[in-house]
Image (cartoon, helix red, strand yellow):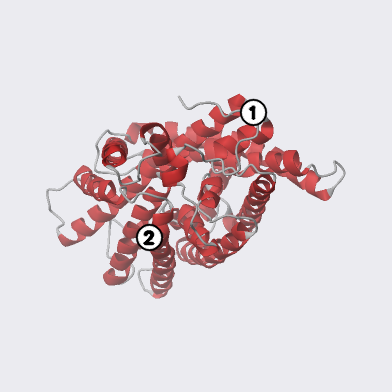
């Protein structure tokens, strides 16, 4: 059990004898490195579900929700960076979300609440990344060998083996080149998917365009809230303090530039994929637009080399995403297993690192193979986890540290966001749990069929 941070002001760097901080969260990065990390944490293959979210919202509401979520999350992350900057100026540079929340809000239980939510989100993303990467390999394998004997769990095992090797990169900062590649991969598969959708829309096999919503008002409401929860999870990033920790001090002002880089990529990728996919497939959009382009019955609706290259880019980026969201687990492990007084690569620290990180990846791979219906579970985790971390806590932390006047616009906006997104989180949790229950009869352990 992690120890509760002291309520007395920590030392200037917040690191001291903490091996997790000294090793995993070493502060050497530039602002553009933070931009790479942020982009990998937010812009992932989940954007391929955006046409599906429009299917539950329609054109007008879909555009509104996508734009509103982008504006609110940028504002939220900017406020978080201001809170971290204020604490650093006061001599309390926080490098972990859980310690920041506990210090600013003055609550020991908040420490455990944040670490629980972070662990659920990060482990969930790790499991999901391995599952989706295994699915990408299976797609390529089945296209080359339709009657092959390999199953989904075989490919998950392959991905897990690769992740065990990559997980040995010792620090978050050492992922900067990996995450630069991830940024280009996201731009690459987004461009390929948009091009494939344009080709599909112009082909004779193009599906009829139907943008109507379901007739039942209750089902329409549930679908809308499920879509909003998915969009919130797509924009979610529960590790911003840890990303800011990788910046060389002083970190003040650098995070804003990293956020601007990240959101420039978001603008290009999110809107292009959402519009192109929904325009072509409308109410028949699959939860992954690649599945719409490669239907189970009939020919592919775009050149196979285009779709194949997109799948390769997705696969490669998933490896980076799995690594980024594992960093919190790694720093927790090293905080309790490593000796900061010995070198990062000393035998005393290297052997536990190799063993514990391999064990963590094996556990994620095992659950990915066992639960190929994890998409539904991650929807619930997204509604429960991302919304409090990204839409509630940053506003509370800002109000506490900067103390805006209660009649100011800032105070009003912050509290409005807290109220609205708390409600969205509650309803979104209910709607995603409802979908989980409806899909329960399709769940099979160690199945080769991934449930949408």
What SS does tag 2 mark?
Answer: helix
In-image side of 328 versus 294 (left or right): right
Q: Quadrant of the C terminus?
A: top left
Q: Which mark lies nearer to you, 2 or 1?
A: 1
Q: Is residue 363 shown above or below 27?
A: above
Q: Is residue 340 shown above or below 65?
A: above
Query: Residue 294, image x and y in percent?
Result: 31, 61
User: Which of the two discs, 2 and 1, labels the residue nearer the N terminus?
Assistant: 1
Q: Residue 177's quadrant in the figure?
A: bottom left
* Outermost residue, front side: 341
Q: Which mark is residue 100?
A: none
Query: Residue 344, image x and y in percent?
Result: 35, 45
* Outermost residue, right side: 407
Give the residue displayed 46% in from the left and 66% down from the top: 280
- Observer-nearest residue: 186 or 262? 262
In-image side of 221 versus 370 (left or right): right
- Observer-nearest residue: 329 or 87? 87
Q: CA distance from mark 2 to mark 1?
A: 37 Å
Q: Is residue 188 shown above or below 95?
A: below
Q: Are marks 2 and 1 in contact (CB under 8 Å)?
A: no
Query: Residue 268, image x and y in percent?
Result: 53, 68
Q: Quadrant of the N terminus?
A: top left
- Could you tell me if residue 300 is visible in this image? no
Q: Which mark is residue 178?
A: 2
Give the residue displayed 44% in from the left and 53% down from the top: 46
What SS does tag 1 mark?
Answer: loop
**Which residue position holds label 1?**
7
Crowdedness of circle 2 by 10 Å Cα count: few (<14), some, many (20+)? Answer: many
Query: Residue 422, image x and y in percent?
Result: 65, 36
């Amino acid at each position: 059990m992690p120890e509760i941070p002291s309520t007395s002001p920590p030392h200037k760097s917040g690191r001291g004898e903490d091996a997790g901080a000294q090793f995993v969260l070493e502060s050497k990065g530039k602002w553009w490195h933070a931009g790479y990390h942020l982009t990998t944490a937010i812009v992932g293959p989940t954007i391929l579900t955006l046409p599906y979210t429009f299917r539950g919202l329609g054109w007008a509401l879909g555009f509104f929700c996508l734009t509103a979520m982008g504006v609110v999350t940028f504002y939220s992350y900017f406020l978080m960076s201001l809170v971290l900057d204020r604490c650093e100026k006061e001599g309390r540079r926080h490098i972990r979300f859980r310690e920041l929340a506990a210090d600013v809000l003055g609550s020991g239980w908040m420490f455990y609440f944040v670490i629980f939510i972070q662990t659920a989100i990060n482990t969930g993303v790790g499991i999901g990344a391995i599952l989706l990467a295994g699915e990408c390999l299976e797609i390529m394998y089945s296209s080359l060998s339709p009657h092959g004997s390999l199953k989904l769990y075989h490919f998950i095992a392959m991905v897990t083996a690769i992740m065990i090797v990559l997980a040995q990169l010792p620090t978050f900062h050492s992922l900067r080149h990996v995450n630069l590649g991830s940024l280009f991969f996201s731009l690459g598969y987004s461009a390929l998917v948009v091009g494939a959708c344009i080709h599909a829309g112009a082909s004779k096999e193009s599906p009829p365009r139907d943008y109507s919503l379901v007739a039942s008002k209750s089902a329409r409401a549930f679908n809308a809230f499920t879509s909003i929860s998915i969009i919130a999870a797509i924009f979610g990033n529960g590790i911003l303090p840890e990303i800011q920790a990788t910046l060389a001090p002083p970190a003040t002002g650098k995070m804003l530039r990293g956020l601007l880089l990240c959101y420039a990529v978001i603008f290009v990728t999110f809107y292009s994929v959402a519009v192109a996919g929904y325009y072509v497939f409308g109410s028949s959009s699959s939860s992954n637009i690649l599945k719409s382009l490669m239907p189970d019955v009939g020919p592919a609706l775009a050149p196979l080399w285009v779709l194949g290259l997109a799948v390769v880019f997705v696969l490669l980026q998933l490896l980076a995403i799995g690594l980024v969201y594992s960093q919190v687990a790694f720093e927790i492990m090293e905080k309790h297993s490593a000796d900061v007084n010995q070198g990062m690569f000393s035998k005393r620290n290297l052997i536990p690192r190799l063993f514990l990180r391999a064990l963590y990846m094996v556990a994620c791979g095992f659950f990915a193979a066992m639960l190929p219906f994890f998409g539904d579970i991650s929807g619930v985790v997204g509604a429960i986890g991302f919304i409090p971390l990204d839409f509630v806590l940053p506003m509370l932390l800002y109000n506490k540290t900067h103390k805006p006047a209660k009649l100011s616009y800032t105070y009003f906006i912050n509290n409005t966001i807290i109220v609205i997104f708390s409600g969205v989180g509650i309803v979104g949790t209910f709607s995603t749990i409802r979908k989980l229950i409806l899909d329960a009869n399709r769940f099979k352990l160690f199945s080769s069929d991934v449930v949408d």
